[in-house]
Image: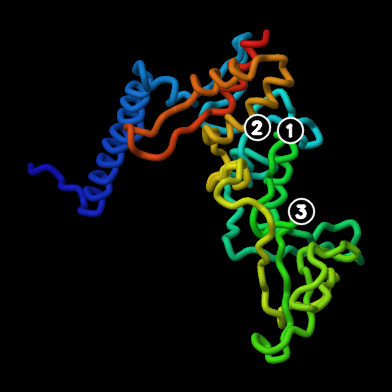
Amino acid sequence: MPATRLPSFVRQHLAAFRALLVLTVLTGIAYPLVITAIAQLPGLKDKANGSFVTNASGQIVGSAEIGQLFTDDKGNPIPKYFQSRPSAAGDGYDPTSTSASNLGPENIVDSFDDPATKDEDESSQSLLTQVCARSKAIGDLEGVDGRRPFCTANGVGAVLSVFRTGGTTGPVTRVVSINEECPAAPFVATYQGVKVECARFGEDYSAGVTAPVKGPGKGTDNPVPPDAVTASGSGLDPDISPAYAYLQVNRVAKERGLDPATVHALVHDHEDGRALGFMGEPTVNVLTLNLALDRTTR
């Protein structure tokens, strides 16, 4: 008696089930186990496990791949430590909120708080003002001239809204320093013979021509490097440029009672060169540098 042939739809489902089992074993069990085993080989294990960094007591204090802040509970830099670059990830270096500020070079106008809603904060700093404020703060911390072009002496974007009789042409009729809220005194008293006003919340200055004003701040020779005043794309960059690290040497050495030459040499020892010798720029990992510094002054 011939064997009973299963219906075609049953054969199709059995074939699909067998394929599911085979692929599950291959891609869901075998492949992950092989990759995990390869990741545990010498030279790969540390990176695969998170590149954790430990202190002198053997405690895990962070990852070499994720930056962190060296500030006090009020957000002020701890002077005895090298400082990281700014971060736009959450409150700073939050791996669950990795992000950039998404602000571009044309973002130069600040917004102010509504005085009618005192419990809310609607203010926001433009990229220009953020850079100006950070550069001034770093200059004050490190004892150097942190002024930058297009910045006021108070660390605000030096931007005017210029009103003319013909819109964009003709004599100037009104000038407003749009990043300096009243009652602040504008960074310049007059512009083309017209008195400069401070900005008032709620007023519309869009009819004026937005004009950044180049002040006395330094340009390319500014001692505060770009990575010190701008956040990385991920907000988690653990590295700073050697230029920013060396800028901090004197302050750190003074706070720890060390010879600046000793701290300078420590920074030099923690410089990482370009990838493969030609890609990217040299960097200094802030966490590993600070841990080495702690070991030096134990």
Q: Amino acid at mark 2?
A: Gln
Label 3 residue SS:
loop
Colour scheme employed for the rendering of this structure: rainbow
Which residue occupies 72% across, 86% down? 164
Looking at the image, is mark 1 or mark 2 earlier in the sequence?
A: 1
**Circle 2: is it few (<14), some (14-19), or many (20+) Cα within 10 Å?**
many
- Quadrant containing the N terminus is top left
From the image, state whether disc 3 or disc 2 is nearer to you.
3
Mark 1 in CB contact with mark 2 (< 8 angstroms): yes
User: Hey, which quadrant is residue 183 in on the image?
Assistant: bottom right
Residue 45 left/right relative to 194? left
Q: Which residue is mark 1?
A: 77
Q: Is residue 103 above or below residue 222?
A: below
Marking on residue 153: 3
Q: Is residue 4 above or below residue 143?
A: below
- Residue 57, position in %: x, y? 63, 9
Question: Gap between marks 1 and 3, in whole Å?
Answer: 21 Å
Q: Which residue is mark 2?
A: 83
- Residue 104, position in %: x, y? 57, 60
- Quadrant containing the C terminus is top right
Question: Gap between marks 3 and 2, in whole Å?
Answer: 23 Å
Q: Amino acid at mark 3?
A: Ala
